[in-house]
Image: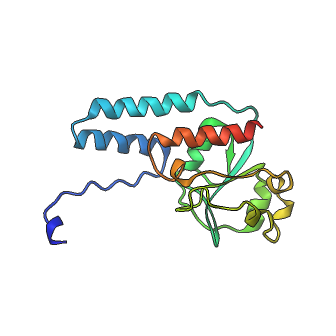
Amino acid sequence: MEQLEGLEVLHLTPQTLEEVYRSIEKIGKKFSAEEKAEKVIEEIREGLEDIEVEGNPRVYCEEWMDPPMASGNWIPGLITEICGETFLEEGERSKEFDLENLKDFDPEYIFLNVCGAGENIDTKEVMERPGWQEITAVENGNVFVIDDALLNRTGPRLVEGAREMAEKIRK
């Protein structure tokens, strides 16, 4: 702690996709790498523009499993950008929810991007939850795991996570 005293801290808490871009700009400015930051932002924007999914599927992402917590912040914006409707609004914090609200939304696809789990999640846990069998995604077996590092961390990997979601939806 003593070694850190007096150091300036750059604290960033983006909650929307646009705020993710602004955070990258701030980091670039802080380290005199504005051009590099703009290039990264442009690559993310172009990468997302290249991802297309037909229709307007309803997508639910889960950030935590016990209790189930819907992914918020920039993730709904990312989903809207590439393909569909989201359970939470962009900028809304990740949170617990009432199962009846999820049933009313009735997602066609469920993605598990559970914090710290990588891809080490068994979709069976969701498929066997009491009351979830009536949800279209569960009925159709459209429950997938995505490495949380591709969605829960802001930066260029968001494109890879979005691409992976789109590939699952297109199948």
Q: Quarter holding the C terminus?
A: top right
Question: Which residue is rendered at x = 79% and y = 60% of the image?
Answer: 103
Q: Quarter holding the N terminus?
A: bottom left
Question: Which residue is rendered at x = 21% and y = 37% of the image?
Answer: 32
| Of residues 102 and 112, the one drawn nearer to the viewer in this rendering | 112
Question: Which residue is rendered at x = 70% and y = 62% of the image?
Answer: 122
Colour scheme of the rendered structure: rainbow
Left or right? Give the position of 30 relative to 74.
Answer: left
Residue 77 sits in which quadrant?
Answer: top right
Left or right? Give the position of 81 relative to 128.
Answer: left
| Of residues 90 and 163, the one drawn nearer to the viewer in this rendering | 163
Residue 165 sits in which quadrant?
Answer: top right
Relative vertical location of residue 139 with respect to residue 81 in this rendering, above or below: below
Residue 36 sits in which quadrant?
Answer: top left
Could you say where residue 61 lies in the image, as x and y percent from the top left? 65, 54
| Of residues 57 and 114, the one drawn nearer to the viewer in this rendering | 114
Find the residue positioned furthest to the front. 120
Relative vertical location of residue 105 with respect to residue 126 in this rendering, above or below: above
Relative vertical location of residue 127 with respect to residue 58 in this rendering, above or below: below
Could you say where residue 58 lies in the image, as x and y percent from the top left? 73, 46
Number of labels in the image equals 0
Could you say where residue 129 lies in the image, as x and y percent from the top left? 78, 69
Please indicate, yes or no, whether residue 61 appears anywhere in the rendered image: yes
Question: Which residue is rendered at x = 62% and y = 43% of the image?
Answer: 79
Could you say where residue 26 lies in the image, as x and y percent from the top left? 30, 43
Please indicate, yes or no, whether residue 56 appears anywhere in the rendered image: no
